[in-house]
Amino acid sequence: MKKINKIVSGILGLLGIFLLTTSCENMNDLQSKYTNQKEETYLGKVDSLKTYPGLKRAKITWYIGADPKIEQTIIYWNMRKDSIVRDFVRATPGVQKDSIIVENLTEGTQLYEFRNINSKGNTSLYSSSSVTSWGERFANKLIARSITSQVYVFDSLKFKLSLSKTFSGDSVVYSQIRFTNSHGTENNIRINRTTNSLVLTDFPQGGELQFRTAFFLPKLGIDTIFNAYKVYKAPTR
């Protein structure tokens, strides 16, 4: 019995040594794998993103940290199918503000991603922000002025109009009327937000005028935007 126990103990000992040796070899291989990898260096990322909508465009501002190795900022949108590369010119050793206006955008909101790079292949982590551009759909949702009454004087070809009043915080800058007079001349009239009535002269019977409102949202956007023209028509005898 003692002999059998010694044999079993010997086998177990050899198995333990084998398992320990295999484990050490695997650990050494794993350590060697990561030791031989090149350490990845990240640049400072874009910080404090702010966006300002415009008419089919948008302004974006951000800050670049003190990292002296940053050379360019890449701006991606449309699932990274579209991009702009902006050179970064350092003017101060500390934190520096940068900005760009992206033109020719479709109306709506998209996700934009920002990444700093340099010529050595170093990159930063991504920063992202939702960017909105305005168009007629957005303007049509704002509270616009309207023509509330129309009186046409046939003998003098005058079109007397009354307009809805403006109020504080409505973002209305002015309104605009466009029409062609009885001599075929096109007229464009700008109406101040405090003007509530006006008379169009030399207005032809049955003639049409187009009316729209201009808005500016100073705390949100960078552009004046317009709602769609609404058509009004003078009567005929």
Image: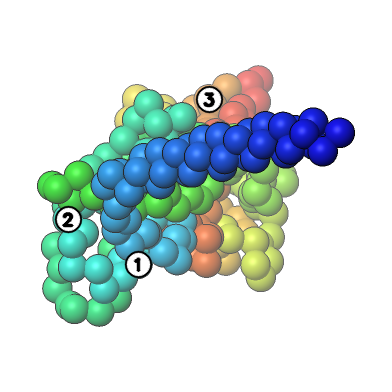
Check if mark 3's residue and mark 1's residue have beta carbons within 8 Å. no
Which amino acid type is shown beneath numbered disc 1? Tyr
Residue under pointer 1: 63
The residue positioned 34% from the left and 30% from the top of the image is 82
> From the viewer's perspective, is 162 left or right of 218?
right
Which element carries disc 2, helix, strand or loop? Answer: loop
Q: What amino acid type is highlighted by mark number 2?
A: Glu
Residue 159 can be seen in this image: no
Disc 2 crowd, CA 10 A, few/some/many (<14, 14-19, 20+): some
Mark nearer the viewer, 1 or 2: 2
Q: Is residue 174 left or right of residue 167?
A: left
Distance, label 3 to label 1, CA atoms, is 55 Å
Q: Is residue 124 above or below residue 27?
A: below
**Horizontally, is 177 left or right of 184 in the view?**
right
Of 199 and 177, nearer the camera is 177
First in residue order: circle 1 vs circle 2: 1
Q: Residue 230 appears at what percent x and percent y?
A: 60, 33
Question: Which residue has dot 3 on it?
Answer: 207
Displayed quadrant of residue 75: top left
Instruction: Report, in whole angstroms, how far the alpha carbon at label 3 lies from the one at label 2.
Output: 60 Å
Q: Are marks 3 and 2 in contact (CB under 8 Å)?
A: no
- Colour approach in the figure: rainbow
In this view of the protein, which residue sits in the foreground, 211 or 100?
100
Evaluate whether residue 35 shows in this view: yes
Q: Is residue 73 left or right of residue 230?
A: left
| Label disc, if present, on residue 71 of the rendered structure | 2
Q: Are marks 1 and 2 in contact (CB under 8 Å)?
A: no
Q: Amino acid at mark 3?
A: Gly
Q: Position of residue 48 (x, y in %)?
A: 45, 66
